[in-house]
Image (tube, helix red, strand yellow):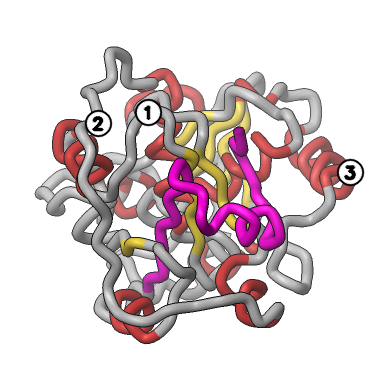
């Protein structure tokens, strides 16, 4: 079972394995249709496509962030449509180091599906190694994924939780956005710039080596220990702009055995919905 990462070589060896399902998660926030268009042009053989807006999120509400989680029944129906059952090994990938694929990996953890892994290096590494591809849209034979008996909501925190814990020295809140967005110098997406007071910044892209794969476990352990200090991983909370790229930290932490970190999934785009919530810059 692959539960965090899978190499391109390991994935290629299982292209014909009926118990493996590959899911292409390519996406562009500025051009929402780009991912599916490029998927149709070329993708890993047999892979189905998951759209961040349509498949991995529910419609935005007046109080939500930009990418609220879908209803669990709706998500389970998607798993069924993609040909996934509880015994399926899921492999997710994108072209941005996992920044979108990690969202689906985390959602599978929430419904208790541990056999989910992110393709290390993504589709870019797959292409560089001249591995096989196909075009068009893949439709798999549907299954009937049973509704999970337990959703792991203990991995989630609310805005109220964050507001209560942000000044508690026993916890650390990590902002996964680019440093200039954290500092409030630039905000290309959300209507208000800044960050949650008390949060520290670690851009999710810092988890990656130059080739787009995750950094070595030893390097990640060194960097996260420096970031967390005396705070254990289970008392760390991550957020980003809308609960997508912050999942990158969850994958990186899980890959080095740092368990229990939670996510504020509403993230910055939800935080700023309430004018009474404080905002910091710098």
Q: Which residue is mark 3?
A: 218
SS type, badge 2: loop
Q: Nearer the viewer, mark 1 or mark 3?
A: 1
Whole-angstrom CA distance, mark 1 to mark 3, is 32 Å
Give me the residue at 47% from left, 56% from top: 101
| Label number found at residue 86 | 1
Task: Compare marks 2 and 1 and give the one earlier in the sequence.
Answer: 1
Question: Percent position (x, y) of residue 60?
Answer: 15, 53
Kindly tell me whether residue 203 is visible in this rendering: no
Mark before the other along the chain sequence, 1 or 3: 1
**As displayed, is residue 209 above or below residue 243?**
below
Q: Quadrant of residue 190?
A: bottom left
Would you identify the image quadrant in which residue 79 lies?
Answer: top left
- Real-space CA distance between mark 2 and mark 1, rounded to the nearest whole angstrom: 7 Å
* Spot occupied by residue 71 in the image (x, y as percentages of width and height): 17, 36
Q: Which of the numbered marks, if any, corresponds to residue 145?
A: 2
**Which residue is at the front of the view, 280 or 202?**
202
Is residue 66 in sight in this rendering?
yes
Magenta stretch contains residue 10:
yes
Image quadrant occupied by the C terminus? bottom right
181 in the magenta segment: no
How many numbered discs sit on the rendered protein? 3
Secondary structure under the numbered disc 1 in the rendered image: loop
Residue range in magenta is: 1-27
Marks 2 and 1 close (CB-CB < 8 Å): yes
Percent position of residue 145, x then y:
25, 31
- Picture residue at 20% right of the left edge, 32% below the top: 144
On the picture, is 193 further left or further right than 207? left
* Front-most of residues 84 and 197: 84
């Amino acid at each position: 079972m692959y539960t965090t990462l899978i190499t391109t070589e390991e994935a290629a060896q299982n292209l014909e394995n009926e118990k493996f399902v590959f899911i292409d998660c390519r996406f562009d926030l500025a051009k929402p249709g780009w991912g599916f268009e490029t998927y149709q042009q070329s993708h890993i053989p047999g892979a189905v496509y998951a759209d961040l807006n349509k498949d991995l999120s529910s419609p935005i509400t007046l109080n939500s962030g930009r990418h609220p989680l879908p209803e669990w029944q709706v998500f389970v129906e998607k798993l069924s449509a993609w040909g996934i059952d509880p015994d399926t090994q899921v492999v997710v990938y994108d072209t941005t180091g996992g920044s979108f694929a990690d969202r689906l990996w985390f959602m599978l953890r929430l419904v208790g599906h541990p056999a989910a892994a992110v393709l290390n290096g993504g589709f870019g590494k797959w292409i560089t190694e001249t591995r096989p591809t196909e075009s068009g849209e893949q439709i798999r034979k549907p299954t009937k994924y049973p509704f999970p008996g337990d959703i792991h909501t203990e991995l989630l925190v609310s805005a109220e939780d964050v507001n209560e814990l942000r000044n508690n020295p026993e916890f650390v809140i990590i902002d996964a956005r680019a440093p200039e967005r954290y500092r409030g110098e630039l905000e290309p997406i959300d209507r208000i710039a800044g960050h949650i007071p008390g949060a520290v910044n670690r851009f999710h892209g810092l988890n990656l080596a130059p080739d787009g794969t995750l950094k070595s476990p030893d390097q990640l352990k060194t960097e996260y220990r420096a970031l967390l200090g005396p705070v254990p991983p289970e008392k760390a909370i991550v957020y980003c702009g809308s609960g997508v790229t912050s999942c990158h930290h969850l994958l990186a932490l899980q890959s080095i055995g740092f368990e229990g970190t939670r996510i504020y999934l509403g993230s910055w785009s939800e935080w700023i919905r309430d004018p009474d919530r404080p905002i910091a810059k710098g």
